[in-house]
Image (spheres, rainbow, N blue to C red):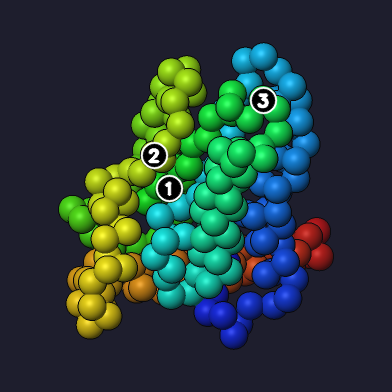
């Protein structure tokens, strides 16, 4: 996740993002699904996307596009598995779509949480616990945390003007600006330390 505006992204950064956040899911499913279909017990496919795949956000065009792609891929796969022309064993395949909000992980380190009240940070262990519960229960469905993530779809039926107000109040489009500044500061600090260390080595 670069936190850059679209015009600042390099082709290599865009490609790397899609390889990691989207294409890897296609590869994984195509590798393991045939054996799951052949198994008597089937299995569960868990697609980990993000609520940002439904929202989009400033300075996250590459990341949110990949996450939106995952949501569309999951819906298409679910439709294929329930189709009359689905391969044998498809009825034993469960699917879970995971669309969390901001997680308390190093990926989001430096991101200014827009609103701790409206959008509290999710602890990964809470998300993992719910995923394991659904897998063990043999359930299909969607996991959205925190509460606001379950209501995002309703945002899109509202008038455009109201959507703009909601986005402004939530601060979703301002959050990554602080992230970018923090990331630049850390990069500069790292470069400075390396330069100082190089100078000290030269003196020795």
As drawn, the label of residue 99 is 1
When the figure is inspected, residue 35 is found, relative to residue 108, above or below; the finding is above
For marks 2 and 3 on the same chain, the one whose residue lies earlier in the sequence: 3
As drawn, the label of residue 89 is 3
Disc 3, SS: loop
Asked whether, in this view, residue 156 is left or right of residue 10, the answer is left
Residue 161 occupies which quadrant of the picture? bottom left
The x, y position of residue 135, in whole percent, is 49, 23
- Mark 1, Cα crowd under 10 Å, few <14 / some 14-19 / many 20+, is many
Disc 1, SS: loop
Q: CA distance from mark 2 to mark 3?
A: 24 Å
The x, y position of residue 40, in whole percent, is 67, 14
Residue positioned 49% across, 36% down in the render: 96
Can you identify the residue that label 2 sits on? 143
As rendered, which of 67 and 125 lies closer to the eye? 67
Q: Which numbered disc, 2 or 3, marks the residue closer to the eye?
A: 3
Residue 58 occupies which quadrant of the picture? bottom left
Asked whether, in this view, residue 164 is left or right of residue 19, the answer is left
Which residue is outermost to the front? Answer: 84
The x, y position of residue 30, in whole percent, is 75, 41
């Amino acid at each position: 996740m670069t936190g850059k505006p679209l015009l600042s992204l390099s082709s290599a950064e865009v490609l790397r993002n899609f390889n990691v956040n989207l294409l890897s899911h296609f590869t994984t499913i195509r590798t393991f699904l045939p054996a799951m279909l052949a198994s008597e017990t089937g299995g569960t496919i868990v697609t980990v996307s993000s609520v940002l795949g439904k929202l989009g956000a400033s300075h996250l065009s590459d990341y949110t596009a990949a996450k939106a792609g995952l949501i569309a891929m999951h819906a298409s796969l679910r439709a294929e598995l329930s189709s009359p022309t689905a391969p044998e064993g498809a009825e034993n395949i469960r699917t879970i779509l995971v669309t969390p909000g901001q997680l308390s992980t190093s990926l989001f380190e430096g991101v200014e949480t827009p609103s701790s009240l409206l959008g509290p940070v999710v602890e990964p262990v809470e998300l993992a616990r719910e995923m394991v519960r659904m897998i063990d229960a043999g359930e299909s469905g969607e996991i959205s945390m925190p509460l606001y993530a379950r209501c995002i779809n309703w945002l899109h039926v509202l008038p455009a003007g109201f959507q703009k107000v909601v986005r402004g109040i939530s601060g979703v489009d301002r959050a990554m600006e602080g992230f970018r500044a923090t990331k630049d500061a850390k990069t500069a600090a790292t470069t400075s330390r390396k330069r100082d260390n190089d100078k000290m080595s030269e003196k020795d």
